[in-house]
Amino acid sequence: MDFQEKVRKGFYEQSFMSFLGAEITNIEAGFVQIELPFNKNLLQQHGFYHGGVVATLADNAGGFAGNTLMSEDEQPLSIEFKVNLLNPAKGEKLVAKAKVIKNGKRIKVCEVNIYGILEGNELHCAVAIVSVIATKQEL
Amino acid sequence: MDFQEKVRKGFYEQSFMSFLGAEITNIEAGFVQIELPFNKNLLQQHGFYHGGVVATLADNAGGFAGNTLMSEDEQPLSIEFKVNLLNPAKGEKLVAKAKVIKNGKRIKVCEVNIYGILEGNELHCAVAIVSVIATKQEL
Amino acid sequence: MDFQEKVRKGFYEQSFMSFLGAEITNIEAGFVQIELPFNKNLLQQHGFYHGGVVATLADNAGGFAGNTLMSEDEQPLSIEFKVNLLNPAKGEKLVAKAKVIKNGKRIKVCEVNIYGILEGNELHCAVAIVSVIATKQEL
Amino acid sequence: MDFQEKVRKGFYEQSFMSFLGAEITNIEAGFVQIELPFNKNLLQQHGFYHGGVVATLADNAGGFAGNTLMSEDEQPLSIEFKVNLLNPAKGEKLVAKAKVIKNGKRIKVCEVNIYGILEGNELHCAVAIVSVIATKQEL
């Protein structure tokens, strides 16, 4: 199983991703992209995407970006992440782009940028830094 | 409208909270508690609550804890948060307890602890620090 | 060598600690306390302790709190930390109190609170969360 | 007083910067660069620059990058920052490069990258995200 198949499989085994309606749309070595179309269930009280939705994409994109650089028997486990919410998250979909900025043996550190796509333009909603550990154990 | 009513109203105006099935179960000055019963839609690939679900509770509990100390015309807006995932999030429900540790005029800083309730026992899943700004503007 | 001796030795091998004038004043399993007396070299432009001084204590206290729970051949390495500056850092000394909140096999997570001691009273300056990895390798 | 003069003045009014030996070497709208030459007082127990030194540069570079976009009567105040230590900090000097990624009215969010310069090559030591508030009050 190549890393792209492994990442895709892991992604879709998460019930929460299909519940939200998220898709993984690009998988490269050290990079993944996740997209989430607008859905009226995902909002906070002002009609923007909920900060938790944004954080979910950050966590998940970071984890799987890290996973692209792990061996076949390793699983990604986010140990911590920080999200800065820069602008209201709005638009016809959200896109999270995660890249590995430190490919440590055990710890991968990823930077994730999340954008709202508003009439085709990217609006920068959030930046996140995610630390992911490679684990061989069943959790 | 007292602060408890204001917080409760804000909480339930978020479509994402009812989509997840979360409830706000305690509202005091400088403190809120949110609970989320188990639901098979909320999981990651190993069967634990998704890290994004944990982060959502952290963000939301922190924001509304901050809101308990704001004036009636102020709205809470999370500007950033950091989550450390300490243990696998499992159990019959998740409970997030947020308290304000700095009640600044504009910025409230909250510490949030998230627990899985497993056969009645609290398992410490995560700790988060959330910065919330009080805003009077429409976002 | 017991853990207290190991921690004390590691602490004082750091040239930066003696340059600042910091002392480690309490070492228990899962807890350390560091103190730093006032010194006019440690300030920012408004006469308070510099945020970097506060962060230094947070990083160091967290790392050595983690170290108290590591085996003799393991060294602590901070992988990331977040500091929230809650109040201006002032007083006759700074005190950082770090406790381990997750004693993972590889990763220890510590919460650190930093106080300015002003006429004997603790003023809460900052809270930090520090992730520390146990490493056996020479760095 | 233009913003470059204001930033330079604020920077050098910090006793901690001259104590460390740091210089501000580039000031543009939304960007600053700080450099710190090697000095045997700045080290941790393995002979690398101390994590607190790295964090100090992150905090300071972020704060002054934010300051470049503030009005003349506003002062920068870091409210929180997160640092990920990616590689051992070594070399003949450290360089911190901070850019504003969100120029909010009140809150500026900066990304800071810190490099060790080793025989002229940049080694990526750390990434930090810093939130800075513009304040008109005396602190």
Image (cartoon, coloured by chain):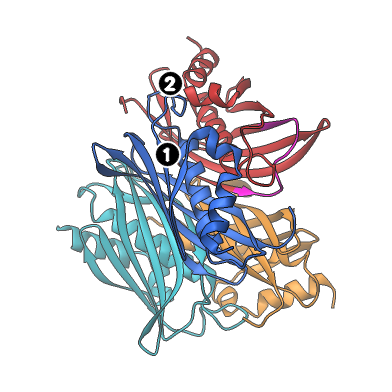
Chain colours: A blue, B red, C orange, D cyan
Instruction: Quickly name the residue at label 2.
Output: B71
Query: Considering the numbered disc 1 on the image, is that residue within a helix, a strand or a loop?
Result: strand
A20 vs A72: above or below: above
Magenta segment: B84-95
D66 vs A44: above or below: below
- Residue D18: x %, y % from top left: 38, 73
**Can marks 1 and 2 be said to lie on one chain?**
no
Residue B118: tell me if it is visible.
yes
The quarter of the rendered structure image containing the N terminus of chain D is bottom left
Q: Residue at x 62, y 80 (%)?
A: D45
Q: Chain of mark 1?
A: A
Residue A36's disc is 1
> Is residue A126 in the magenta section?
no
> Is residue B92 in the magenta section?
yes
Q: Residue at x 30, y 40 (%)?
A: A117
- Residue A118: x %, y % from top left: 27, 37
Hey, what amino acid is under mark 2?
Ser
- Residue B109: x %, y % from top left: 51, 39
Residue C108's disc is none
Please name which of the two marks, 1 or 2, marks the residue nearer to the observer: 1
Residue C45: tell me if it is visible.
no
Number of numbered markers: 2
Q: Label 1: how many residues lie within 10 Å, few (<14), some (14-19) or many (20+)? A: many
Hey, what amino acid is under mark 1?
Leu
Q: Residue at x 31, y 53 (%)?
A: D101
**Residue toward you, C19 or B69:** B69
